[in-house]
Image (tube, grey):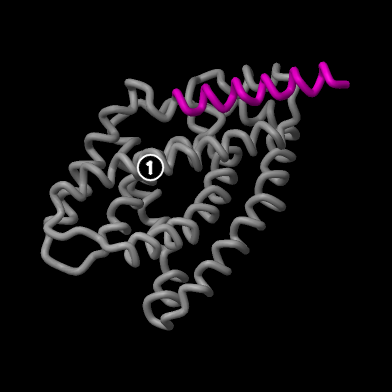
C-alpha cells in the first residue's frame, strides 16, 4: 500500500513538473511578449483602468492554453496520461494546481514589466484588492477551462490566428467574470462579499468541477482522442 501511494505521489509530482515546464517553455515566449506589450499599451492609455486588472488579464490571456486545452498541449498528451496509474481526478487536480501556480508566477513577472512603464504605482490597498479580484475570476475560469478541455479539445494550437482568437475569447470570459467583483467591491463597497464569492467559487471548483471533468474524460477518452 505504501509503495503504491509512493508511486502515485511520484507520478503526480512528475505531472506537476511537466505542467510547470510547459508554462515556461521556449514556445510560449512569443505569447508572453505579445501579451506584455498589450498590457503596456493598456496602462499607457488615458483612463482609470486599475493596474492589477491589466496585469491579471494579461497573465491569464498568456496562459489560455493551460486553462482551456489541458489535455493536448502536445498532440498525444491525453494518451500518455492514460498510461499513468493515477486516477483522473488527481490528474485534473494536479493540472489545475499547476495552472494556479503558473498564474501566480506569470502575474508576478508581468507586474514587474508592466508596472515599470505605468505612470503610477499601486498601493497596498490596491494590491490586496487585486488579489481578491484574481480569486473571484480564477476558479470560475478553471471550471470553464476544465469543461472546454474535454468538450472542445484542440490538438493543433500553434497557429498565430488560433492564438489571437483563443486568447481574445479568454479575455472576454475574464471580463464577464469580473462583474461580481465590480458589483460587490467597487459599487457596493463590500470586499468581504467578494472574498466570500471567491471562496464559494473555489469550493465549487474543487467539489464539482474537478470530479466532473475527471468523470467525463474517463468516459469519453476514445471520442476525445479521435477529435481532429
**6 is within the stretch colored magenta:** yes
Tell me if residue 120 comes above or below residue 217 in the rendering: below
- x 12%, y 56%: residue: 44
> Quarter holding the N terminus?
top right
Dividing the picture into quarters, in which one does residue 45 lie?
Answer: bottom left
**201 is within the stretch colored magenta:** no
Q: Position of residue 210 (x, y in %)?
A: 67, 45
Q: Is residue 24 visible?
A: yes
Dividing the picture into quarters, in which one does residue 82 lie?
Answer: top right
Q: Going by the picture, which residue comes out furthest to the right?
A: 1
- x 71%, y 40%: residue: 216
**Drawn side of residue 38 relative to residue 168, left or right:** left
Tell me if residue 36 comes above or below residue 196 in the rendering: above
Tell me if residue 33 comes above or below residue 61 in the rendering: above
* Residue at the spot of label 1: 166
Looking at this view, is 215 or 2 the one in front? Answer: 2
- x 49%, y 57%: residue: 135
Q: Position of residue 53 (x, y in %)?
A: 32, 58
Q: Position of residue 121 (x, y in %)?
A: 20, 58
**Drawn side of residue 82 relative to residue 50, left or right:** right
Instruction: Tell me where the magenta segment starts and ends, as one range.
Output: 1-21
- x 56%, y 21%: residue: 77
Amino acid at each position: 500500500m505504501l509503495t503504491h501511494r509512493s508511486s502515485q505521489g511520484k507520478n503526480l509530482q512528475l505531472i506537476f513538473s511537466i505542467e510547470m515546464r510547459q508554462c515556461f517553455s521556449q514556445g510560449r515566449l512569443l505569447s508572453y511578449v505579445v501579451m506584455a506589450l498589450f498590457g503596456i499599451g493598456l496602462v499607457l492609455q488615458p483612463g482609470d483602468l486599475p493596474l492589477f486588472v491589466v496585469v491579471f488579464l494579461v497573465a491569464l490571456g498568456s496562459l489560455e492554453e493551460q486553462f482551456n486545452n489541458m489535455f493536448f498541449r502536445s498532440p498525444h498528451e491525453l494518451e500518455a496520461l492514460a498510461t499513468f496509474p493515477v486516477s483522473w481526478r488527481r490528474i485534473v487536480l494536479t493540472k489545475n494546481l499547476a495552472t494556479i501556480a503558473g498564474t501566480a508566477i506569470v502575474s508576478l513577472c508581468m507586474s514587474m514589466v508592466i508596472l515599470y512603464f505605468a505612470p503610477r504605482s499601486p498601493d497596498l490597498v490596491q494590491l490586496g484588492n487585486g488579489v481578491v479580484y484574481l480569486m473571484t475570476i480564477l476558479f470560475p475560469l478553471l471550471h470553464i477551462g476544465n469543461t472546454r478541455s474535454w468538450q472542445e479539445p484542440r490538438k493543433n494550437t500553434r497557429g498565430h490566428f488560433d492564438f489571437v482568437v483563443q486568447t481574445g475569447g479568454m479575455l472576454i470570459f475574464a471580463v464577464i467574470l469580473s462583474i461580481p467583483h465590480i458589483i460587490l467591491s467597487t459599487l457596493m463597497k463590500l470586499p468581504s462579499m467578494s472574498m466570500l464569492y471567491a471562496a464559494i467559487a473555489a469550493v465549487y471548483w474543487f467539489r464539482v468541477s474537478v470530479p466532473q471533468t475527471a468523470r467525463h474524460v474517463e468516459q469519453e477518452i476514445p471520442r476525445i482522442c479521435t477529435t481532429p
